[in-house]
Amino acid sequence: MVDVGCGAGGMSLALADALRRAGGGTLILVDAVDEVLAAASQSVAAAGDSLVRVEAVLADVGADQVREVITEADLIWAASVLHHVPDQQAAVNRLAGVLRPGGLLAVAEGGLAPRCLPWDIGIGRPGLEERLNGARESWFEGLRAGMPDVARMPYGWTCALRRAGLSDLRSFSYLVDHPAPADSAVLDFVLDRFAWYSEIATDHVSEQDREAVRRLLDPDSPDYLGQRDDVYLLAARTVHTGRRV
């Protein structure tokens, strides 16, 4: 199995567990950032599973070096990584090309953006989160437009998998649903998400909305997100799969 763009290793742990339950095997962790690759390796190693051999590979899925470090994979999992590559179709082609016959490529991209707050939070204009999600789309459009050698992919991920020569194309979505009141893990996620909004999206919203975000993130503010009892988490993620014949 291969976890491409493994990040800190959340999915890597699940893949390692699946390998263990199947009798063991090799799990290859791939990321272009050395620090997060090391963190993922340590997380999986800490699980202490002798049936699973872990290899950490520093590589960029947007470069041809992927073909050199991955050979004949049974399963390649690529979650929220391919949209960062200038030429997404070329990246799908590379990953499809290193599958063994019968191997599966799973691309987790798209779905529905998380919703965490009521429409009216009592600060500024109602609808803050909807505007922040719209600002995120504007930010992402600018991010891709500024990539060197960027290539548009004006079709969906199953089409990209088909163009890469894969068959048995399928998609499914799963729901993430944590109703209010949120536990500490959900609150941490929401705080991290709004901190991310404050970095990437607030240039695309009004000063009033920027002030609202600052107050939500300020532990000394009476509006601090971490103290609200109406925070929740509702989102949907989509996974697209294709198999090499």
Image: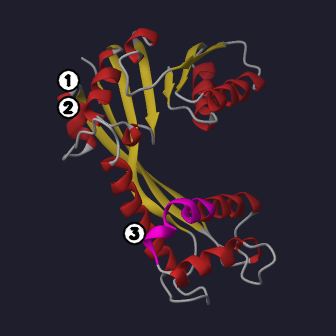
In this view, 55 is above or below 192: above
The magenta span reads: 195-205
Q: Name the residue located 73 percent from the left edge and 76 percent from the top edge.
A: 224
Residue type marked 3 = Gly
CA gap between label 1 and label 3 equals: 34 Å
Q: Residue at x 33, y 34 (%)?
A: 241
Q: Amino acid at mark 2?
A: Arg
Q: Is residue 208 magenta?
A: no
Question: Toward which corner of the image does residue 162 lie, by quadrant?
Answer: top left
Left or right of 206 on screen, residue 39 = right
Q: Which mark is residue 165?
A: 1
Residue type for callout 1: Gly
Q: Is residue 196 magenta?
A: yes
Q: Which residue is mark 2?
A: 162
Q: Image height check: is 48 above or below 156?
A: above
Left or right: 150 as drawn, with respect to 238: left
Residue 140, horizontal then vertical, whole percent: 39, 55
Sequence-wise, which precedes: disc 1 or disc 3? 3
Question: Could you give the CA–CA distance between mark 1 and mark 2, rounded to whole angstroms?
Answer: 5 Å
Distance, label 2 to label 3, CA atoms, is: 30 Å
x, y percentage for residue 237? 44, 51
Q: Secondary structure at mark 2?
A: helix
Say which residue label 3 marks. 134
- Residue at 27%, 19% in the rendered image: 244
Q: Is residue 235 left or right of residue 111?
A: right
**Sequence-wise first label, 2 or 3:** 3
Mark 1 near mark 2, Cβ–Cβ under 8 Å? yes
